[in-house]
Image (tube, rainbow, N blue to C red):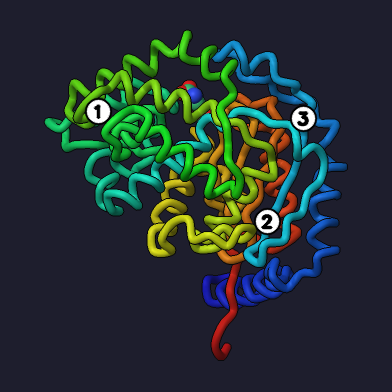
Amino acid sequence: MNFRTIQPMRYALAAVAAMLFCTALPAAAQSPKQIQAALDSALTRFKNVREGANADYIPALARVDPNIFGIALVTPNGKVYTAGDVTSQVSIQSISKVFTMARVIEDLGPNSIVERIGVDATGMRFNSIVSVEFSQKALGGPEINPLVNAGAITATSMVPGATRDEVWKRILDFHSDFAGRPLTVDKEVFDSEAATNQRNQAIGSLMYAYGFIKDKPAQATDIYTEQCAISVNARDLATMAGTLANAGRNPVTGKQVMKAQNVPGVLAVMATAGLYDDSGKWLYRTGLPAKSGVGGGIIAVSPGKFGIAVIAPPLDAAGNSVKAQLAIESVSNALGGNPYAPQVSGKR
Ligand code: GLU
């Protein structure tokens, strides 16, 4: 068979594949019953998965119940779907990095994080010090992003406020607006991480030494540690994701939490670096901008369709919740959530 005969066959196969893909309706076109069935089915399929282990480098996280498993999904019309345990709370951890980055973009503009932190994948661990070394100004400037620790601590340092309290309130209020209720901090987790976060303190100092953090690096690391200890349940996280899916307007409370035009940049960084060293694999499988945290939560966003969150503490080797990845991928596939799925428009 030569190239000329293979080529038309390829097109025919691609057309069939596209037609099969397109039978998945957009979530908005699906009935509440179908959406609920997608969540229930994921819960049943994955509840007995036993792989993974709680994070233990923060001592308090090792003590969290590993059996918590809750799925929540919020649509742009404000409907909340849940399955499993959506009332148990865990610490938000790295998922907070998304919202502090968004705060900085709102306050200082989209270029602020590009110039001071970068929006590139580091290809290194989330708490890498080597990535900071490669980011020195002499080597061309910042090549990290606000979702790894060095970038996140820098983002926290950029939040406006004359005192620690002012900066903290600005961050906590913003998270609460996304969740649609006043959030609080898990003091045990905060104290536990504050007592053991010498590596993050070193990263904060290094970012200050290299001029990325302008002032008070110790305060920035301390506030960053506190933001990671904010308590959330799966419903809170799904509402936060749902707000990003709904152009920055909380679909449950109706409050415009951030400017619609700033949302795509936030989603782009999540797509680039949301799931640690497995961000590429995740994007390849699901197409969804997402962010995970070592507390066991993952949020994912299908723009205009839904925000979804799952909490299940045991993590894989990359640091991502095993069950949360499986459940989000399953629900999103059932609801046609992949933004890169073939879109047919115009005459064919
Ligand atoms: N507070 C954690 C740390 O800085 C967050 C890590 C994570 O969730 O990725 O190590």
Which of the two residues, 281 or 126, is positioned nearer the viewer here?
Answer: 126
Which of the two residues, 5 or 24, is positioned nearer the viewer here?
Answer: 24
Q: Is residue 237 visible?
A: yes
Identify residue type, mark 1: Phe
Which mark sits nearer the N-terminus, 2 or 3? Answer: 3
Q: Which residue is mark 2?
A: 74
92 shown above or below 339: above
* Quadrant showing the N terminus: bottom right
* Residue furthest to the left: 138
Neighbor class of circle 2 (other Cα within 10 Å; few <14, some 14-19, many 20+) is many
Image marks 2 and 3: residues in contact by CB distance under 8 Å: no
Which mark sits nearer the N-terminus, 2 or 1? Answer: 2
Residue that appears at 39% across and 46% down? 103
213 shown above or below 346: above
Q: How many marks?
A: 3
* Quadrant showing the C terminus: bottom right
Residue that appears at 68% across and 72% down? 22
Identify residue type, mark 2: Val
Identify residue type, mark 3: Ile
Which of the two residues, 161 or 117, is positioned nearer the viewer here?
Answer: 161
Residue 214 location (% of width, % of height): 19, 30
Label 1, secondary structure: give it. loop
Give me the C-alpha separation between circle 2 and circle 3.
Answer: 20 Å
Which of the two residues, 7 or 203, is positioned nearer the viewer here?
Answer: 203
Q: Which residue is mark 1?
A: 134
Answer left or right for 230 relative to 45.
Answer: left
- Quarter of the image for residue 192 reads top right
Answer left or right for 334 relative to 193.
Answer: right
